[in-house]
Amino acid sequence: MKEANEEKITGLPENAYRELNEGEEYQPILSPDKKYPEASAWSITWGLLMAILFSAAAAYLGLKVGQVFEAAIPIAIIAIGVSGAAKRKNALGENVIIQSIGASSGVIVAGAIFTLPALYILDLDAAFYQIFLSSLLGGFLGILFLIPFRKYFVKTMHGKYPFPEATATTEVLVSGAKGGNQAKLLIVSGLIGGLYDFIAGTLGWWKELISTTMIPLGETIAEKTKMVFKVNTGAAVLGLGYIIGLKYAAIICAGSFVGWYVIIPLLSQFADVNVMDGVTTVNNVFASMSPDSIFSSYVKPIGIGGIAMSGIVGIIRSSGIIKSAFGLAVKELGGKSKLDAETKRTQRDLPMKIIAIGIIVTLILIFLFFYLGVINNLGIALIALGIVTVIAFLFTTVAANAIAIVGTNPVSGMTLMTLIITSIVLVSVGLSGTSGMVAALLIGGVICTALSMAGGFITDLKIGYWIGTSPIKQQTWKFLGTFVSAATVGGIIMLLNDAYGFGAASKLQAPQANAMAAVIEPMMSGQGAPWMLYGVGAALALILTMIGVPALAFALGMFIPLELNTPLLIGGIISWFVAARGKDTGVNKARKERGTLIASGFIAGGALMGVVSALLKFANLDLEATSWLKTTGADILTLLAYVLIIGYFVWDSKRAKPQEE
């Protein structure tokens, strides 16, 4: 394989985002027949530095507001900047490695902060090694379980999944390497989207959320019928909806609308009706509940049941892929198969023999962690290992599928289900109370991190597939990024707990961890779970599957808050409007591509400003105009600003011309 001279990057091939025709192959930007700089001292050092910095920033913001910003895009922007400043040649492959190593931060943070702070909230003992090892071993397991499915998700399903975050990150990396008009457009749209989100989220000149309750009529409707319409006005979420497209955005919103405009009103109007001696008495327990409370208590569990059943259906449907992956592993373990020397560089994964051995070693370490450091009971430690192995493996494909479709990993929902199952199992074998809660939360932490890693890593591998880097190098160095991120997150969680504490009365509320604590405490006391609601969600997913509707996307809509789903639909409508309204297919295609670049800029700008906001909040610099946000003027300005950002999106997308450079 020959070394590549410095090459001019011309952009992604035209078939990068569409399904391939019969016999057609996707050719990435970097030729599979040439060797490029990838895993170098430069890229590894910068990747590890990004992992440390973004682990700290993401952990603080996630514990404060319950949202972990996606680190991939800001890291990609920084990688382009430092590579350009150092005038490195053929830096695109190195930048992918920097992004892949550094992006370990966001997924490890999500896995850790959604569960482990609950240990402190419940006043339980939590040592550094417990937080570190649960994050580290969960991250390793997620990587190893996902690698056998790489080809299926990134190659076999090429063009069938939108991969919104991977698309945005790839556009950033390619535009940075290409320069010219595309880079300028990305910078301009990134500045506009980033400034827009920064003004809303940090300065508070307008709101991040608009709702029908901001007018008296809307408030009355919400009070009497529990019906409310909400939209997150962020530019980044709008861009995400554009990349997802109208089809999936509509299905996601359909799930959300069924929850908010069918289930919630029905529950509020027709609950607890009793007839005695000809007299009808209505004791409506929902009358005093807000729509958000009903959503959290009743609709969300239905969504969790739907996600779980969608995962089971997906596992059954992909059983052939799972079987072939196991078959290859068995052959290699028996020495019957070797890595084909003719396999193209861009299709080389870690050998299945190494993956199988890695999984076995990781599972042994998880068992030792539970037995020696958590439970101290051989039988229960084996049961804990079984729970981790089965759930992490089965839901790996669900996590990857969710990221590929909507760009959001429903890991907190899957972890909540895991905690409930784990609690029931542990109580049934005699482990309850304080010891049971510690064990269940650490089991949940391992699984949550594994699923978070699986969902996040498929994004990295899709980016590498589009660009043409070596998967084996991404996979190899991802372990080091995971190790550094886990160590950083463990220290940060303990530091922040000492400084602020976690909980509703604290500066760091840790919303997901509070939810986990609220679920696990009664479960360990013998109370039940909302199995009926989970069953309804599971039945709904089966019905949707039978009629050909993507059940996972629909269930995600029921699980994710309404205000985050509606902007996806708006973005999807914009995508349809700019790409399907013209009479010339060449013009439509150019508009679609220009819109994708603008959407990527919005996402990149929003993500980068999320980092800036996190740093400002970490420094206790509160710049938000809180009193102004409570006024009618702020509502009007928010609506106007949102209409303007949508107008700019449509206008600039429609300026595209065929063969635009």
Image: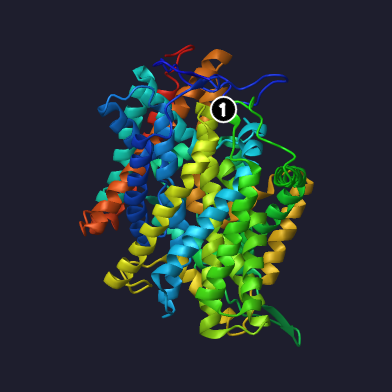
**Residue 397 located left or right of residue 494:** right
Residue at image mark 1: 345
Give the class, few, some or many, for how many residues have Cα within 10 Å of label 1's Cα (few <14, many ≥20): some
**The residue tagged with tag 1: helix, strand or loop?**
helix
In the image, farthest residue toward the front: 335
The answer to whether any part of residue 227 appears in the image is no
The amino acid type of the residue labelled 1 equals: Arg
Residue visible at 68% across and 71% down in the picture:
531
Q: Is residue 244 above or below residue 146?
A: above
Quadrant for the C terminus in the image: top left
**Residue 382 located left or right of residue 87:** right
Observer-nearest of 641 and 215? 641
Residue visible at 44% across and 74% down in the picture:
119
Observer-nearest of 444 and 549? 444
Q: Quadrant of residue 280?
A: bottom right
Rendered location of residue 558, percent (x, y): 59, 55
Observer-nearest of 332 and 32? 332
